[in-house]
Image (cartoon, rainbow, N blue to C red):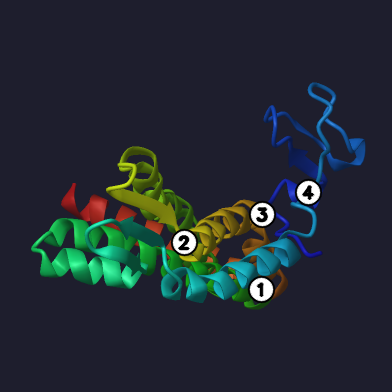
Amino acid sequence: MTFDPTTAAARGFTRCHSCGRVETAAARHCPVCESPLHLRKPASLERTVAFTLGAGLLYFPANLLPVLRIESSIKGEQVNTILSGVIQFWQDGDYPVALIIFTASVVIPLIKVLAIVALCFAVRSGRSPAAMTRLYRMTEYIGRWSMVDVFVVAILVGVVQLGSVLRIEPGGGAFAFAGVVVLTMLAAHSFDPRLIWDAAAANGRTHRVDSNAETLGARSADTSASHA
């Protein structure tokens, strides 16, 4: 593995993920908390690809299978998918609810899967490491908003149980959607963004990033001097 010569990893130092202590990787275990030490997350790319493939496979049944199964003594049995629920809310005039569910249940999981795929390709190519790092941070940030639909199903199942009048049960789509959420969270957690910079260093791209930063810094200094 090729490390940027300006990094601590190139000198054999690593940071403990539990207590934050900086120690040599040769120690193998942190002397403070005894957690395993490693320069990079073990099998990070392999585990990330496996979790992402699983999430991608579950994404389609999550949107096509029923999320809610409603049994009513008045209207009989009704089956709703995520998309049909969004359409129903929209037709009823509940536009904010429809937009929230569509964004959290359809758009965000798809964006997160595509973003993780792009990050995995960046580990191979080493292109645009700074942009890919920002993409990784954004992926982690938006991940927490993809649980909205699961919460809605849980609330409906737990609260709206009216005996013989109305009964609501989660369908297979809810479990598939929960699987998508969990797998994308695991994929983002297992991914090591430092691998992007390692690939950039192997391809000689980090020097371009440093030279661009120096150029921008010089321009900023020249601008400040001219204003002074």
Q: Secondary structure at mark 3?
A: helix
Image check: 125 left or right of 46?
Answer: left
Residue hosting label 2: 171
Q: Is residue 141 visible?
A: yes
Q: Residues within 10 Å of mark 1 (few under 14, many from 20)?
A: few
- On the image, which quarter does residue 129 sit in? bottom right
Q: Where does the image place residue 4, in percent across and percent down from the top left?
A: 70, 59
Q: Where does the image place residue 194, in percent across and percent down from the top left?
A: 65, 56
Measure the alpha-carbon separation of dots 3 and 2: 29 Å
Q: Residues within 10 Å of mark 2 (few under 14, many from 20)?
A: some
Measure the alpha-carbon separation of dots 2 and 1: 51 Å
> Sequence order check: which comes first, mark 3 or mark 2?
2
> Sequence order check: which comes first, mark 3 or mark 1?
3
Residue hosting label 3: 190
Label for residue 204?
1
Q: Where does the image place residue 184, in percent across and percent down from the top left?
A: 55, 59
